[in-house]
Image (tube, rainbow, N blue to C red):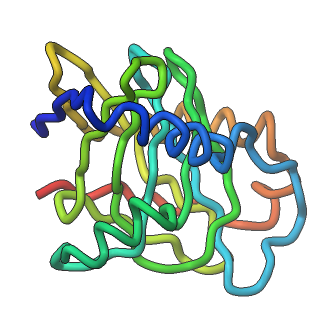
Amino acid sequence: MVTASRNGGAALFLLPLCLLIAACASTSSMKDVDAIPAGKGVMVLKAVSDQQVQLQWVDYSDTVTFGSSMSEYYLGPKGSVLTPAGERIWVLTVDAGEYMWGDVLLVSQYPAMRASFHTGTRFTIEEGKINYVGDIHLEMDSGRVGMSVTSSAADVAAYLEASYPLLMNRYELEKSLTEQR
């Protein structure tokens, strides 16, 4: 479990930054297509949270340095989704590569609360495949944010068959669950 704390002194600086980052987050899944662009894969995740959160991912690294943390903080993550409270399945085109979950922003709170999951998670997006990275559960309790990963691959496959028939007819669904250390 990762602990995140509130810092009122930084609130005036963080609020505009969080609003800017939230504006860059994906708020909708991709359309059904029959081709995945070269160098890309499709990331499928089911986000489960009791609050609205922004879930971010960054390039995978065995270690996190001060420079990489500052880069993510000021320049932004590799990608992110703005997830409402409840369950939501996301289907996104992403550059193929190794990733890890980065920061989780609780954007429904003021000041915004940030929790980091760097180096504790890892997932792979393979080129030309539909990559299911799992059900990402985020639980918030008394200033703490917990992340767990489960699999509902059969339910996700049924959802994809119904909502993305062109994609599912042409590409295989790869179960690439997020590893947690």
Q: Position of residue 10 (x, y in %)?
A: 31, 38
Residue appearing at x 32%, y 29% in the figure: 138
Q: Is residue 77 left or right of residue 178?
A: right
User: Among all residues in the image, which is located at the extreme bottom?
Assistant: 38
Instruction: Please identify the quadrant where the C terminus is shown.
Output: bottom left
Residue appearing at x 66%, y 50% in the figure: 24
Quarter of the rendering containing residue 171: bottom right
Looking at this view, is 53 or 91 the one in front?
53
* Position of 84 relative to 162 (above/below): above
Residue appearing at x 39%, y 59% in the figure: 73
Q: Position of residue 159 (x, y in %)?
A: 68, 33
Looking at this view, is 176 or 122 the one in front?
122
Q: Position of residue 57 (x, y in %)?
A: 44, 59
Q: Is residue 47 left or right of residue 179?
A: right
Q: Is residue 14 left or right of residue 81?
A: left
Quarter of the rendering containing residue 144: top left
* Position of 80 relative to 69 (above/below): above
Residue appearing at x 56%, y 59% in the figure: 79
Instruction: Please identify the quadrant where the N terminus is shown.
Output: top left
Q: Position of residue 121 (x, y in %)?
A: 24, 58
